[in-house]
Image (cartoon, helix red, strand yellow):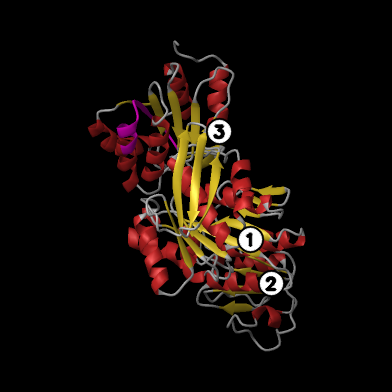
Amino acid sequence: MKLKNLLEGTEIPYPAGLSDLEVTGITYNSKLVKKGYVFVCIKGFHTDGHIYAMDAAFQGASVIVSEEDIPIKTVPVLRVEDSRRALSKLSAKFYENREVPFHIFGITGTNGKTTVAYMLKSIIEAAGSQCGMLGTIGYHVGSREYEARNTTPESSDLQAMFAEMKEEGILNCVMEVSSHALALGKVDDVVFEGVVFTNLTEDHMDFHKDKESYFAAKKKLFTLSKGPAAVNLDDEYGRRLYEELKREGKPVSGYSLKDKKADYYGEILESTEKGSLVRVIEKEEREQILKLNTPGIFTIYNALAATACARSAGYPFQYIAWGLESLKGVPGRFELVENSKGIAAIVDYAHTPDGLENVLKTAAGFTKGKLICIFGCGGDRDKAKRSMMGRVAGQYSDFCIITSDNPRTERQEDITADIEAGIYDTGCDYEVIENRYEAIKKAVSLYKKGDIIIIAGKGHETYQIIGTEKFHFDDREAVREIIENGCLGKA
């Protein structure tokens, strides 16, 4: 692509004589630069791309895009006010292919994004179309899966994966859109066909500072979208978003388990430890029975979100029912770990107060014995939610084990102390076992028939970050290994 074509419509100025310069790629990672690439210097949380501009030039970059003056004479430097914004615009332009129809659905909210994404993907595939998926668990492009370093990829990676999907004939993509991605402009040039708001609760206050800023970041998705929105009316911020979008004249549907006049009202017909049957009534007229294979009220809400989004995009109820029933579960989301001893051990990604409460309330609903909860909180992250999670765990559990999550560079003792401040007043019995493997081992040793063990916080993750190092650790592998090795209590 010629530089003049790449910059067309971006408002990025360039020196005369460079219009015919050939551009072969775009990246913000100097290690990925090849001859003819545009290297965009972006400032990250841990490093600044501007310091790698010289490396990029040496690797063969044809153009450097920067927010600062960089003393490089061998390669032209284009100055911009916001290099992240420039990266998004340039990437969208470079990978643009208007001839191929491509349908993108975005999901945002504190909890439920991953499950809604899996549900939507299953619905689209039940209708006979292939669907890519980008989110917390991984980036799925056809038969290939890439590790997810962030819930939402950087804009250039995002556009490259969209292009890869199109080349494979995959014309649909569902993606989780994090508040970080929205605040940083990663999806500013993505055209969404439908968007979903699940809920907004305590999380990421280390980044957004307060809930108003957090909400503003989430709402940005709905100002970017060209398509209809599906919003949870039973969430305080969801109701607010719904009313604001209505006033602004934007297409929006509300879903609810409480408001019978909602566009999509869910009536729970049956709810057991194996799943639920739900009647969904659309606009007080049409209805459909949905069978869900994962228990819990949160699963029902996620199914309503997926249903509202799919219906707004024109998918018949029949495919929605097929898609949801065929989905047996989502990795690390209320995932029962199979084992030969019949021990009820459930792994879940819940790492917010609201998420943990949903999981524990669901488990408490069918626990015949004691509910044992193992959890921790991440280090170098939102400290305000730690005591709240301790309080929630203490309220719903019979016994808690506080352990490490991803302590990173923070002392585990300090993290534990913050959690204990919340759990102490509940009167719940608890123990502190810093080593996560030993914590799981202790829970299994206490297990008696009828009990349920909840291992919360990491879900699908296969690592722990301790200090600055990443170590392999999978809750599912650990509990299965411990159970099969016979570390059991008395029946």
Q: What element carries label 2?
A: loop
> In the rendered image, is residue 387 in sight?
yes
**In the rendered view, would you say 102 is above or below 379?**
below
Residue under the image location 62 percent in, 75 percent down: 72
Q: Is mark 3 on a helix, strand or loop?
A: loop
Q: In this view, does 381 lie to the left or right of 388?
A: right
Residue under the image location 55 percent in, 28 percent down: 337
> Which dot, 1 or 2, sits closer to the camera?
2
For mark 1, does the 10 Å Cα neighbourhood hold few (<14), some (14 to 19), or many (20 or more) residues? Answer: some
Query: Which comes before the other along the chain, label 3 or label 1?
Result: 1
**In the rendered view, would you say 442 is above or below 158?**
above
Q: Position of residue 14 (x, y in %)?
A: 63, 84
Q: Is residue 385 left or right of residue 81?
A: left
Amino acid carrying mark 2 in the image: Glu
- Residue ID for mark 1: 157
Residue projecting furthest to the front: 285
Give the magenta-colored segment's residue range: 392-406
